[in-house]
Image (cartoon, rainbow, N blue to C red):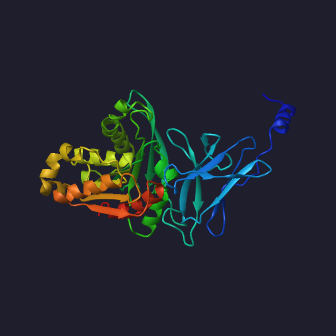
């Protein structure tokens, strides 16, 4: 047991908190970013609205604080990092962190004049629960699964709900769609406006093969993740939550790597999923040969898919893959929606897509 005098001594010996403000969102939607690094010789800044690989130089003041003011920015939530003498770090004084499988970033929210779909509004809120499960498929690992349940779920004990399985991208975590994608607020707001059917959203960790593994190992990630989803995740969800039965009450979607996973798993299991969404997807390069039977029998495939929704930003490096996939589907007369929008490979685009995709489900 620590004596009071020692506690006081430790408190007095602790360094004072840094009073630096970063980020600072200005009234004109410009944002000032600051980092205290008095011994650094060079500090640069990157925000996810900038071109990939771009670095903005920061200026140092007499107190050793480096700063840069950028913008104005469109309303949204943006990811950013500092690079201090070659070391990329999150903002040390910003508690809003975007966790990733490797490295982390910071987030800044730039509000608009009216509340956006992804912002918390004064409406009934659903709950987000983190489940821990020992995987039988992935070597006994204990993995997390984030689950959103809609407002009223706890009270409406007799009601069963359709399920959307929602996947993140490469180097992200299971909670990415909540922490950066604001999926829970998007669902809350759509439900409050009667624009969506109440549903459960399941967000598992998509790296079945550890992120950073050799390329040969990474090639098997989707296949192992598919087995993990079918044998571990879905049985847990269907045993613990009040899930409506049947493929017509089950959808699958994801962004980037997760978009490729949703396409692969969805087309592999049209017996299990009736709707597929692919946002800025890493679409399988061998889609045409791998899913030749589904492409050949357009009538049967269209009858089983109530919704096939593909979207990608025109400034995204994966845009051509989505565009070519849409062209292939058109040539084979597979009914689908293709949304080509402005934007790069960011959650700014994916929040928009989720807001468009969810209202189309389970109608």
In this view, the residue in front, 173 or 288, is 288
Q: On the rendered structure, is 260 left or right of 141?
A: left
Where residue 339 appears, x then y in whole percent?
33, 63
Q: Quick one: which residue is furthest to the bottom in this view?
A: 113
Residue 2 in the image: above or below residue 319: above
Q: How many marks?
A: 0
For the point 82% across and 34% down, the residue is 10
Work out which quarter of the rendered image holds the C terminus and state it.
Answer: bottom left
Q: Is there any visible trace of residue 160 in the rendered image? A: no
Residue 309 in the image: above or below residue 28: above
User: Where on the picture, by quarter, is residue 150?
Assistant: bottom left
Q: Quick one: which residue is furthest to the right in this view?
A: 5
Work out which quarter of the rendered image holds the N terminus and state it.
Answer: top right
Where residue 37 appears, x then y in whole percent?
72, 44
Where residue 21 appears, x then y in whole percent?
72, 55
Q: On the rendered structure, is 121 left or right of 190?
A: right
Where residue 16 appears, x then y in whole percent?
80, 44
For the point 61% across and 43% down, the residue is 89
User: Where on the picture, by quarter, is residue 338?
Assistant: bottom left
In this view, the residue in front, 3 or 20, is 20
Q: Is there any visible trace of residue 235 in the rendered image? A: yes
């Amino acid at each position: 047991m620590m004596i009071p005098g020692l506690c006081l001594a430790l408190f007095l010996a602790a360094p004072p908190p840094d009073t630096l403000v970063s980020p600072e969102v200005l009234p004109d939607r410009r944002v000032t970013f600051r980092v205290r690094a008095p011994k650094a010789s060079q500090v640069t800044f990157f925000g996810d609205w900038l071109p990939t690989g771009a670095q903005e130089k920061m200026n140092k003041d007499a107190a050793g604080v480096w700063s840069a003011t950028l913008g104005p920015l469109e309303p949204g939530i943006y990811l950013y990092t500092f690079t201090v003498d070659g070391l990329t770090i999150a903002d040390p004084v910003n508690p809003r962190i975007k966790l990733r499988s490797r490295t982390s970033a910071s987030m800044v929210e730039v509000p608009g004049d009216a509340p956006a779909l992804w912002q918390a509004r004064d409406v009934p809120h659903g709950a987000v629960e983190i489940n821990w499960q020992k995987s039988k498929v992935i070597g006994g690992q204990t993995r997390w699964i984030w689950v959103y349940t809609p407002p009223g779920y706890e009270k409406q004990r007799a009601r069963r709900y359709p399920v959307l399985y929602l996947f993140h991208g490469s180097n992200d975590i299971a909670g990415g769609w909540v922490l950066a994608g604001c999926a829970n607020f998007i669902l809350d707001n759509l439900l409050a406006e009667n624009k969506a059917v109440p549903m459960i959203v399941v967000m598992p960790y998509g790296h079945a093969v550890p992120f950073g593994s050799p390329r040969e190992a990474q090639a098997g990630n989707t296949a192992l993740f598919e087995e993990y989803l079918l044998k571990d995740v879905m049985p847990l969800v269907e045993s613990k939550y009040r899930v409506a039965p049947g493929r017509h009450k089950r959808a699958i979607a994801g962004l980037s790597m997760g978009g490729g996973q949703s396409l692969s798993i969805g087309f592999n299991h049209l017996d299990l999923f009736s709707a597929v969404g692919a946002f800025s997807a890493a679409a399988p390069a061998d889609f045409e040969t791998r899913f030749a039977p589904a492409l050949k029998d357009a009538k049967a495939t269209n009858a089983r898919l109530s919704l096939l929704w593909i979207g990608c930003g025109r400034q995204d490096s994966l845009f051509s893959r989505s565009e070519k996939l849409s062209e292939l589907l058109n040539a084979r007369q597979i009914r689908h929606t293709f949304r080509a929008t402005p934007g790069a490979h960011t959650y700014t685009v994916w929040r928009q897509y989720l807001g468009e995709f969810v209202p189309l489900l389970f109608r």
